[in-house]
Image: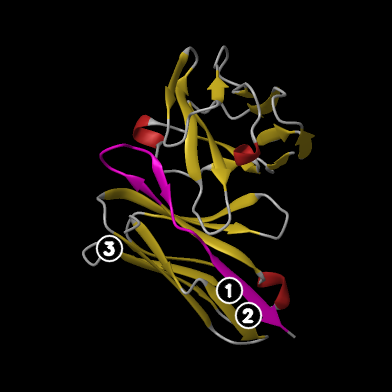
Amino acid sequence: NAGVTQTPKFQVLKTGQSMTLQCAQDMNHEYMSWYRQDPGMGLRLIHYSVGAGITDQGEVPNGYNVSRSTTEDFPLRLLSAAPSQTSVYFCASSYMGRRRNTEAFFGQGTRLTVV
Amino acid sequence: KNEVEQSPQNLTAQEGEFITINCSYSVGISALHWLQQHPGGGIVSLFMLSSGKKKHGRLIATINIQEKHSSLHITASHPRDSAVYICAVRSIIFDKLIFGTGTRLQVFP
């Protein structure tokens, strides 16, 4: 049981480049989400999904795109990287509905630098 | 004002000391989570609370729903407890996690 697998762990991009952060979970969780963590701020929600084929915007969605073609995978795409997207990114998953008040699982994080 | 406030922001302690980290929130919640993040590391769930008190080893978490307040206690602190501790609440209305900014704890031998 691997939990939440997030890759890569580190990435450096040039301004304007695109990339995809991968996130996969093997716990059959309905809810998956992406956060960014910046100094002095709590984790902020970028996008989330409540099931395959369903995604929605969070607090800071601009410049990011997501899709949820399967229950297991929830990739985050940076369309045209900007220095303001330099941050640490976390993917998380959890149950929903009657089981929503159970443990949330987080990936190991991706430290992204845009130069 | 943030919906989830943690105090203190930074905390240093000597090994063996009793540690308390506080979390106050202003929204209706269905649950509160305490998370731990080691330097350069991922985020690990310590506790999920909807009422009362939970204990795991040297860690104790309490919540007072009426006062909208939770505390995380560490007894007999150890240098390996050095980490950022994050409080997060699940909002009843939006059913999403709202995070505090974290408390950075350093325990010295």
Q: On what subunit does the disc labeled 1 rest? A: B
Q: On what subunit does the disc labeled 3 rest? A: B
Q: Is residue B99 magenta?
A: yes
| Residue to which mark 2 is pinned | B77
Front disc: 3 or 2 = 3
Q: Secondary structure at mark 1?
A: loop
In three-dimensional space, the C-alpha distance between marks 2 and 1, rounded to whole angstroms, equals: 8 Å
Q: Earlier in the sequence, mark 3 or mark 2?
A: 3
| Residue to which mark 3 is pinned | B68
Marks 2, 1 in one chain: yes
Q: Amino acid at mark 2?
A: Ser
| Residue to which mark 1 is pinned | B58
Nearest the viewer among B50 and B84 is B84
Residue A6 location, quadrant: top right
Q: Amino acid at mark 3?
A: Lys
Front disc: 3 or 1 = 3
Nearest the viewer among B69 and A9 is A9
Span of residues in magenta: B89-108
Percent position (x, y) of residue B98? Answer: 40, 48
Whether label 2 touches label 1, CB < 8 Å: yes
- Taking A70 as reference, is B61 left or right? left
- Taking A53 as reference, is B37 left or right? right
Percent position (x, y) of residue A113? Answer: 72, 41
Q: Is residue A11 magenta?
A: no
